[in-house]
Image (cartoon, grey):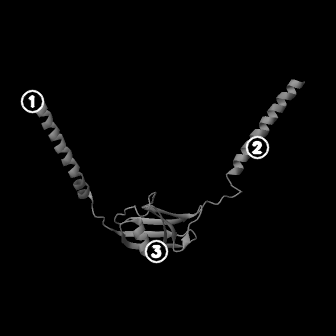
Amino acid sequence: MGILQVGRCGLSVVMLLTVAIILSIPLAVSSSSEAVTAAESVTLTIDFGNGTYREYYNLNGSTVLEVTSSVLEIDVQWFGSLAYIKGIEGRIGEGEYGWQYWVNGEFASIAVNLYSLENRDIVSWVFSSPTPRTLSDPTFIPGLTIILVSGFGFIAIVYVQTQRRIR
């Protein structure tokens, strides 16, 4: 009977600890949340890709979306809880063209509503377009010349060797 009583006591302790852990989880989660403060003195630059540039200084906001929408007319496309800026001041991206942004010179690969800014960050928007390809690529000519000379040289060597065997 002594073993059975110890087992019940141990089970009670385990149940009490389990309940305590479960009850403490919501407290730990709620105590770790912090208020998001707006970044100050943010600089915003816009390159429309057609020679037009704009710069805004001393902006405040906690995300790239907040700062951008505070001074510009934007078209936002939502993918669930993720925001993508499709257009700025009427310039809409389509197909291979679109808006990309950098923060402090580094490409940002996160949704604009999730990128948290810090004081004195520099946000740069650029309207990207595919690089035009030209048919007259100057790097093509030296390579083509080397291949042609090598090919003709190989053919000449084979021809000479074949003529020697025939005689």
In the picture, the quarter occupied by the C terminus is top right
> Looking at the picture, how far across and down is residue 34, in whole percent?
27, 61
* Comes first in the chain, label 2 or label 1: 1
- Quadrant of the image occupied by residue 148: top right
Q: Name the residue located 55 percent from the left edge and 64 percent from the top edge.
A: 98
Asked if the residue under mark 2 is in contact with the one under mark 3, i.e. CB atoms within 8 Å, the reply is no
Could you tell me how far apart the alpha carbons at marks 2 and 1 are, in whole angstroms?
Answer: 97 Å
Q: Name the residue located 70 percent from the left edge and 48 percent from the top edge.
A: 142
Q: Is residue 15 left or right of residue 111?
A: left
> Looking at the picture, how far across and down is residue 70, in whole percent?
41, 74
Could you tell me how far apart the alpha carbons at marks 1 and 3 are, in whole angstroms?
Answer: 77 Å
Q: Is residue 55 left or right of residue 12?
A: right
Q: Which residue is mark 3?
A: 72
Asked if the residue under mark 3 is in contact with the one under mark 1, i.e. CB atoms within 8 Å, the reply is no
- Quadrant of the image occupied by residue 165: top right
Q: Give the residue type at disc 3.
A: Leu
* Comes first in the chain, label 1 or label 3: 1
Where disc 1 sits, the SS reads helix
Residue 12 vs 22, above or below: the answer is: above
Q: Which residue is mark 2?
A: 148
Q: Comparing marks 2 and 1, which lies closer to the viewer?
A: 1
Q: Give the residue type at disc 1.
A: Gly
Q: Which residue is mark 1?
A: 2
* Comes first in the chain, label 3 or label 2: 3
Q: Is residue 41 left or right of residue 166?
A: left
Q: Is residue 87 left or right of residue 21?
A: right
**Few, some or many residues within 10 Å of mark 3 (<14, 14–19, 20+):** few
